[in-house]
Amino acid sequence: MHLKKRILVTGGAGFLGSHLCERLIGQGHDVICLDNCFTGTKHNIYHLMGDPHFEFLRHDVTFPLYLEIDEIYNLACPASPIHYQHDPVQTTKTCVHGSINMLGLAKRTRARIMQASTSEVYGDPEQHPQPESYWGHVNPIGIRSCYDEGKRCAETLFMDYHRQHRVRIKIARIFNTYGPRMHPNDGRVVSNFIVQALRGEDITVYGDGSQTRSFCYVDDMIEGFLRLMATDDAFIGPVNLGNPGEFTIRELAGKIVEMTGSRSKIVMKPLPHDDPRQRRPDIALARETLGWEPGVRLEEGLAATIAYFDDFLRRNEAEAPGAPQS
Ligand code: NAD
Ligand code: UDP
């Protein structure tokens, strides 16, 4: 039995945010979903709109906000390289000003606040897998820096609001997560490959495809968020959340071609600048403190994601191009 809370989810109309809102509503909480709809869309939350415990608020986190709430999940920020590099100054502002505004709100209301940080704080890591104690290897002046350094500065702000103002914080370092409601055109590898395979287009592997990533299914990630938020005030993180299974990008392409039965060819494209060579979370801390580890295998998660995009693309071809329906 959960105590009913009033919970703010920033970035709530995005991929992870919409799943989080759904889970929180399911637990009987009042949810305020804040989003400026840059990469998120109301289509992701239409199914929640009629619920009297759900409220959508179009707002940009870089501007102050006055609300009375018990908990904040701060997810607002474009997550895919294409989108966060589209307006890099706004990306850094969202990370930094957005965090300051949400931390100010947490301070005034005494709300607990969780930051959606990222494995990008480790940059192109020299230590593998990456434990939370690793300080990272990040280029401060590259094309990914608006996001990587923005998120690093956000972590600094969270820690300083905690030390200086005793704000009750939690920091989650999220590794690559995938699933239904990813934006079909955001350029992330799982959505790109699935959409390309379903359309019979070439599968674009960047570089030689030997770089690795670890892919966590969305339901596992949301469970990790909820468990982290439920820890007592003494535990603040940062804590890695991700699936420790590690795959090369070429392997991922092969799996998706096989699972979709596609006749797409795999083609090589240039590797983007500062593309990390390898990434895999060390989740020992999450196991120990949250009793959490991912339960969904890559094949299972891909099957659900392929089914979602298959339906999405069929409907999009029948109707005018639009955003995902739920
Ligand atoms: P997403 O792009 O689908 O969601 C981000 C949401 O934030 C969108 O709905 C967008 O419209 C909103 N937003 C962006 N700027 C805003 C602003 N200034 N004010 C208000 N809303 C704004 O991405 P996602 O994958 O759902 O990621 C959610 C969070 O998790 C992000 O903070 C991201 O950095 C973090 N994260 C995600 C992953 C992943 O693999 N999905 C990995 C690491 C970290
Ligand atoms: N990638 C790829 N083809 C694509 C999209 C991405 O080979 O069409 C590669 C990309 O270069 C990177 C990996 O897949 O090495 C993961 O990319 P994504 O943008 O999903 O996440 P991130 O680089 O932020 O981990």
Image (cartoon, rainbow, N blue to C red):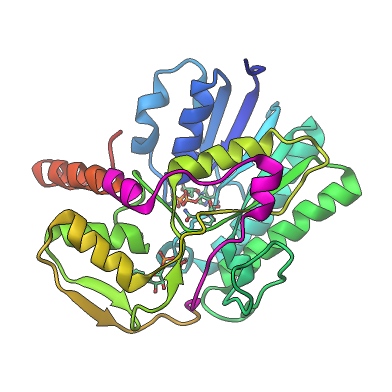
Q: Is residue 170 visible?
A: yes
Residue found at the very far right of the displayed protein: 164
Q: Is residue 36 visible?
A: no
Q: Residue at x 60, y 46 (%)?
A: 61
Q: Is residue 273 left or right of residue 205?
A: right
Q: Is residue 120 left or right of residue 189?
A: right
In the image, is residue 152 part of the stretch drawn in magenta?
no
In the image, is residue 280 part of the stretch drawn in magenta?
yes
Q: Quadrant of ligand 2?
A: bottom left
108, above or below 209, in the image: above
- Image spot of residue 285 (x, y percent): 69, 52
Q: Residue at x 38, y 82 (%)?
A: 271
| Circle count | 0
- Image spot of residue 251 (x, y percent): 31, 69
Relative to the observer, which residue lies in front, 262 or 182? 262
Relative to the observer, which residue lies in front, 267 or 161? 267
Q: Is residue 223 left or right of residue 159?
A: left
- Quarter of the picture holding the C terminus: top left
Relative to the observer, which residue lies in front, 78 or 309? 309
Q: Is residue 209 left or right of residue 290?
A: left
77, above or below 295, in the image: below
- Image spot of residue 7 (x, y percent): 62, 29
Relative to the observer, which residue lies in front, 36 or 213? 213
- Quarter of the picture holding the N terminus: top right
- Image spot of residue 93 (x, y percent): 62, 60
Q: Which residues are magenta?
A: 275-304
Q: Residue at x 27, y 67 (%)?
A: 253
Q: Residue at x 55, y 48 (%)?
A: 76
